[in-house]
Image (cartoon, helix red, strand yellow):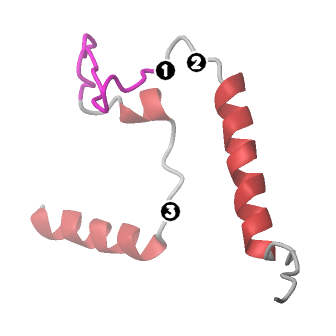
Amino acid sequence: MTIVKKLPPAPATDYEIAAALHRAKMVAKHVPHPNDFEPIDGVLHVTLNAKPITPGTETEVFGPSRIVIPEYQEVLKKLIQKSK
C-alpha cells in the first residue's frame, strides 16, 4: 500500500475560492440605491413616465459631447455647405 500525500491546491484554485468569497461578501453587504431597479425573476420591470427629450436640448440634459473627431466635423461642414 502506498501513502497518498496531500497535494497543495493550485494557485488558480486559490484565486477562484478567494473570488467566490469576495463576491459573497459583496452581495451580503449590497444596499440597493433608491433610483436603481433590480430584476425580478430575471426580468427588468421599468416604468417610463418621463417626457421625451426635445430636439436641441440634448446638450442641456447630457452635457457637451466628449467625443471630438475633427475629421467628422470637417466632413459634416462640407455636407452642410453642399446642401445649401
Residue 6: where, in percent of width, then height? Answer: 87, 75
Q: Residues within 10 Å of mark 2 (few under 14, many from 20)?
A: few
Q: Is residue 69 left or right of residue 29?
A: left
Q: Which residue is mark 1?
A: 36
Residue 69: numbered disc: none
The residue shown at (76%, 64%) is: 15
Secondary structure mainly formed by the magenta segment: loop
Could you tell me if the residues under marks 2 and 1 are in contact, i.e. CB atoms within 8 Å? Answer: yes
Q: Nearer the viewer, residue 73 or 34?
A: 34
Q: Quadrant of residue 10?
A: bottom right
Decide: is 37 above or below 69.
above
Labels 3 and 1: the sequence-earlier one:
1
For badge 1, the amino acid type reads Asp
For badge 2, the amino acid type reads Pro
Judging from the image, what secondary structure is the residue with disc 3 in? loop
Q: Nearer the viewer, mark 2 or mark 3?
A: 2
Decide: is 3 above or below 33.
below
Residue 74: where, in percent of width, then height? Answer: 37, 73
Q: CA distance from mark 3 to mark 1?
A: 31 Å
The residue shown at (26%, 14%) is: 47
Decide: is 21 above or below 2.
above
Q: Is residue 26 left or right of residue 6?
A: left
Q: Which residue is mark 2?
A: 32
Q: Is residue 65 left or right of residue 40?
A: right
Residue 19 lies in the magenta-colored region: no
Q: Residues within 10 Å of mark 3 (few under 14, many from 20)?
A: few
> Where does the C terminus fall, quadrant-wise?
bottom left
Q: Quadrant of residue 53?
A: top left
Q: Which residue is mark 3?
A: 68
The span picked out in magenta is: 36-54
